[in-house]
Image (tube, grey):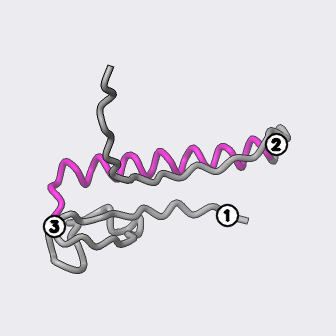
Amino acid sequence: MAYLTIPSLKCFQCGNSFTISEDQLNSELRCPFCRSKMDEESRKDLKDAVLHLKDINYHFKKFHAEREETLFQASVNAMEVHLTPDKN
């Protein structure tokens, strides 16, 4: 069994969501629907985050196999929420 860390993005320019492969993190990143481009610094930050999460999942699996630790798998979902302020 292997874990795949598959990042997904939502483009707020056009409102569409899409997945990207790890290979796509190594070059210019554009929305496949509207072709909006992610800036280079954000792309590098995203790549670092995805690779870090992939490493965490690898270690979860490794420690489970070697040390019989509880097995976990990490994934990240982001959503926009609207909160109403408390009226105290």
- Marks 2 and 3, how far apart in space? 46 Å
Q: Quick one: label 2 or label 3, which is nearer the N terminus?
A: 3
70 or 1, nearer to the observer? 70
Q: Residue 49 lies in magenta, yes or no?
A: yes
Image location of residue 31, percent across then percent down: 23, 72
| Residue receiving disc 1 | 2
Q: Residue furthest right?
A: 68
Disc 1 marks a residue whose amino acid type is Ala
| Residue receiving disc 3 | 13
- Magenta range: 37-64
Of the numbered discs in the image, which one, if any, rests on residue 66?
2
Q: Quick one: label 1 or label 3, which is nearer the N terminus?
A: 1
Q: Residue 62 lies in magenta, yes or no?
A: yes
The quadrant of the picture occupied by the N terminus is bottom right
Of the numbered discs in the image, which one, if any, rests on residue 35?
none
SS at mark 1 in the image: loop
- Marks 1 and 3, how far apart in space? 34 Å
Disc 3 marks a residue whose amino acid type is Gln
SS at mark 2 in the image: helix
| Dots 1, 3 in contact, CB < 8 A | no
Mark 2 burial class by Cα count in 10 Å: few <14, some 14-19, many 20+: few
The quadrant of the picture occupied by the C terminus is top left
Residue 49 lies left or right of residue 42; in this view the side is right
Q: Residue at 85% of width from left, 41% of height from top?
A: 68
Q: Residue at 42% of width from left, 61% of height from top?
A: 7
Q: Which of the 4 image quarters holds residue 66? A: top right
